[in-house]
Image: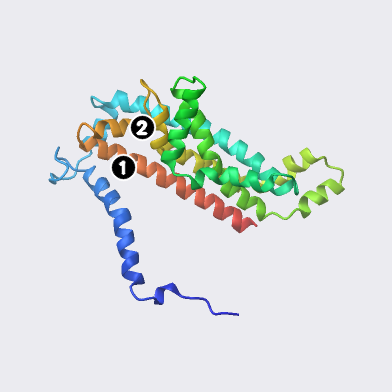
Amino acid sequence: MAAKTDLRRFTGFLPMTFVCLFLLYAPLIIVMVYSFNDSKSITNWGGLSLRWYEEVFWGVESAKFKAAALNSLSIAVVAAISATTIATMAATAMLRAGRFRGKSISFALINLPLMVPEIVTAVATLVFFSAIGFTTGYLTILLAHIVFCIPFAYLPIAARMQGIEDVYEQAAMDLYATRFETFRLILLPLMMPGIISGFLLAFIISLDDFIITNFVKGAGIETLPTAIFGSVKQGIKPNIMAISTLLLMVSVGFVTLSWLVGRMGQNKK
C-alpha cells in the first residue's frame, strides 16, 4: 500500500496556511474589536465601551433593525423546518428506496444549488417569480430560501443515513412492522443527529443569506443582512460593527452546535 503524503512537509505549506487564515479571519477580528470602541470613528481607538451595543437595542435605528431581525428569524425558522423535512424525505428516497429510474438525475438536481453560483440562482429566481407574476416580498424570500437550503440540509442527513445499516429495519419488518412503523420507530431516531445538524445548517444559511434575499425581497421588507447593507451604503457606523459581531456570534454558535450534534451521532454509531 502506498504511503500517505504529508502535506505539511511541502515547502511553504505552513506560511501559506497562516496567510490564508489571516486573510480569512483578520477582517472579522477587526470588526469585533472596533465594535467595542468608545469613539464614533471606525479607525481611531477611544477606549472600551458597550455604547454601540446599547445603540443597537435602544438607539434611533433600533426599531428598523429589530423588525429586520424578526423577519430574518421567522424566515430562517420556517425555511429550515421546510428544507429539513424535504431533505429527510429526499434522503430516504435516495438511500432506502433502492434503484429507480432517474435516481442519478434526482441526486444531481438536489445538489445543483451547491454548484451554481449564488448570483445566478438569485437572478434565475427573480426571473421565475416575475414570469409567473408573483409579487416580490416576504413570501418570495421564504420560497427562495427553502429551495436554496434543501441541499445544505440534505448533506448531513444523507451522510448520517449512509452510516446506518439496514439490518435494523429488516429486523423490524421481520417482526411484522410496517414500512411507516419501521421508519418512525427505527430509522428516524437513528437519523435524528443528522436531521438536527441539517436543520441548524439550513437555519444559519437562511439567516445569513444576502444575495438571493436582496434580489427577491421587493420594496418595504428587509432582513438583517439587507438592512446592514442599506446602512453601510450611507457610511460605516460603529453600531453596524456591533450588529455584525452579534450576527457573527450567532452564526458561529449554530455552526458549532451543528458540528457537535453530528459528532455525537458519529460517536453513538
Q: Is residue 170 left or right of residue 226?
A: right
For residue 224, the mark is: 2
- Which x, y percent locates residue 128? 50, 28
> Which residue is located at x 69 percent, y 49 percent?
95
Would you place residue 148 above or below residue 60 in this image?
A: below
107 or 12: nearer the eye? 107
- Which x, y percent locates residue 260? 51, 52
> Which residue is located at x 78 percent, y 39 percent?
181
For residue 166, the mark is: none
- Which x, y percent locates residue 15? 31, 69
Query: Does any portion of residue 188 appear in the rendered image?
Result: no
Q: Which residue matches tag 1? A: 245
Colouring chosen for the image of the structure: rainbow
Packing grade of label 2 (10 A; few <14, some 14-19, many >=20) is many
Tell me the quadrant of the picture where the C terminus can be found. bottom right
Badge count: 2
Query: Does any portion of residue 126 appear in the rendered image?
Result: yes
- Which x, y percent locates residue 100? 74, 45
> Which residue is located at x 45 percent, y 23 percent?
138
The amino acid type, in three-letter code, at marker 2 is Leu
